Amino acid sequence: MRVFDFDHAIVREPSRSVIDGLRSDQNAIPDYDGVVREHSTYIAALRVAGLAVDVLPPLEPYPDSMFVEDPALVFPEAAILLRPGASSRLGETDEMRPVLKRHFQTVIELEGIQFVDGGDILVTPQAVMIGLSARTCAVGAEALSRVLADVGRAARTVPVPEDMLHLKSCAALLDEETLLTTARMERTGLFAGFRMIIVPDDESVAANAIRINDTVFIGDRYERTLELLAQEGFHVVPLPVTEIAKLDAGLSCMSLRWRAK
Ligand code: CIR
């Protein structure tokens, strides 16, 4: 089984409060109807890719709760509840607990007080990379590494450049040896050992992409990246991301994906 082979996903419908979601540019206010349209297109695309999608209802008290990737981490053998690093998102873990218990026999909690956002976790065939960012602290990364060791997975902790939200804001696994990332991330050396495809400088956000089974999903605004990946022989499907990008979000954040055992 490849680490990007999936048959299940969990997503959460956007709440009306999504317009108050966390973002670096306060002037970029997302349009609720636009977010809903982008989210519906995303769900349809996951289904076409062969996934059974559990669509959770919106949570008004949590504007960012449609980004279900952040409060949990899922594998075929177990699910791990994380603790989002933004205080407005902390309650999302409690909302996710019963959902994971419906899908997984083993649901593991992180011990102690710490923060880990799923957006900082990049699962590769060799190891689970944990990015240290404003949302993921060293104590949290250590707690997660211990839990990962218990389920038989190696972890590797890496620093995320200061002005980036998450490790996966600018990195995605394209196949077992290739990452899509930015020139700046390549220069950090964090991804040494991988083959890297570098997005054009003015399309850095395109690197928040996802590989699901035989398809790579990319934001439809990133035409040159789409072309580049098609030339490299990937089956690429563009998806609309204009509104969710205003929330510093991309394609990976909107689902938890796994292959059932
Ligand atoms: C946040 O700042 O938490 C949300 N507005 C965006 C979360 C994006 N999540 C992700 O990339 N995993």
Image (cartoon, grey):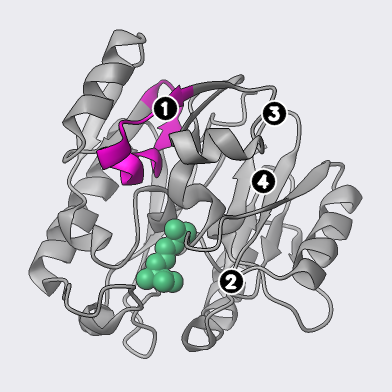
The x, y position of residue 103, in whole percent, is 59, 57
| Residue 186 can be seen, yes or no | yes
Residue type at mark 3 is Pro
| Mark drawn on residue 198 | 1
| Mark drawn on residue 10 | none
| Mark drawn on residue 134 | 2
| Residue 67 can be seen, yes or no | no
Q: Is residue 247 magenta?
A: no
Q: Earlier in the sequence, mark 4 or mark 2?
A: 4
Marks 1 and 3 sit apart, C-alpha to C-alpha, by 20 Å
The x, y position of residue 97, in whole percent, is 61, 74
Q: Mark 1, mark 4: which one is toward the viewer?
A: 1
Q: Which residues are magenta?
A: 197-215
Q: Mark 4, mark 2: which one is toward the viewer?
A: 2
Q: Nearer the viewer, residue 65 or 47?
A: 65
Residue type at mark 2 is Ala
- In the image, is 171 to the left or to the right of 34? right
| Mark drawn on residue 125 | 3
Q: Is residue 213 magenta?
A: yes
Report if the beta carbon of the residue with label 1 is closer than 8 angstroms to ligand 1: no
